[in-house]
């Protein structure tokens, strides 16, 4: 990979930086697929669904609402339950990369959760390809969400 003039000399994190970019793009697409599923489950216009979905500022609230709507007579409740369960797990992994504190020590990247420093998982040594792995997992989940939305819509 070529270094440009903006890359600090000796910076070892280009692979990780690329993975973080891939993760960010994949998450954005994934969230839109979850919205499409929500709109299908809600059975209203995309505009009305958008007002509700994006009016909820918490991702957890959005998922809880999706789960509750699915339980109220959705055609494929178990598929949507699986999608929501997976979204909860992916969000936890993604949030580690996005919201924790980054540091570099001896050419190793470390994430620390300063909100819960006493928890056993409050520090994480980041393998260079871990963000790419998560981006791949998010893209695979996107396919499952898209399929669930199509099934709900076409049902």
Image (cartoon, rainbow, N blue to C red):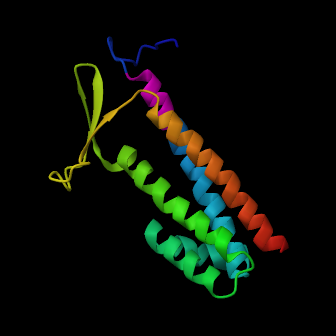
Quadrant in which the C terminus appears = bottom right
For residue 45, above or below residue 120: below
Residue sticking out furthest to the left: 118
Quick one: 5 or 60, which is closer to the camera? Answer: 60
Q: Main secondary structure of the magenta part?
A: helix
Q: Is residue 27 magenta?
A: no
Is residue 84 something that shows in the picture?
yes
Q: Is residue 26 above or below residue 88?
A: above
Residue 140, image x, y percentages: 64, 47
Report if residue 18 lies within the magenta region: yes
> Image check: 69 left or right of 4?
right
Q: Is residue 37 above or below residue 23?
A: below
Q: How many marks?
A: 0
Image side of residue 22 versus residue 106, left or right: right
Segment colored magenta: 13-21
Residue drawn at (46%, 24%) of the image: 15
Place residue 124 in its image quadrant.
top left
Q: Residue at x 56, y 67 (%)?
A: 84
């Amino acid at each position: 990979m070529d270094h440009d003039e903006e890359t600090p000399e000796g910076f070892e994190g280009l692979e990780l930086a690329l993975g973080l970019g891939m993760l960010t793009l994949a998450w954005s697409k994934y969230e839109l697929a979850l919205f499409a599923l929500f709109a299908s489950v809600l059975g209203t216009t995309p505009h009305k669904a958008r007002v509700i979905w994006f009016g909820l500022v918490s991702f957890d609230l959005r998922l809880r609402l999706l789960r509750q709507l699915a339980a109220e007579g959705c055609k494929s409740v178990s598929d949507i339950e699986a999608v929501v369960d997976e979204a909860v797990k992916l969000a936890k992994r993604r949030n580690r990369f996005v919201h924790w504190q980054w540091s570099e020590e001896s050419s190793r990247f470390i994430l620390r959760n300063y909100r819960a420093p006493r928890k056993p998982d409050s520090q994480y040594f980041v393998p260079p390809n871990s963000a790419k792995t998560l981006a791949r997992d998010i893209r695979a989940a996107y396919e499952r969400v898209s399929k669930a939305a199509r099934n709900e819509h076409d049902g």
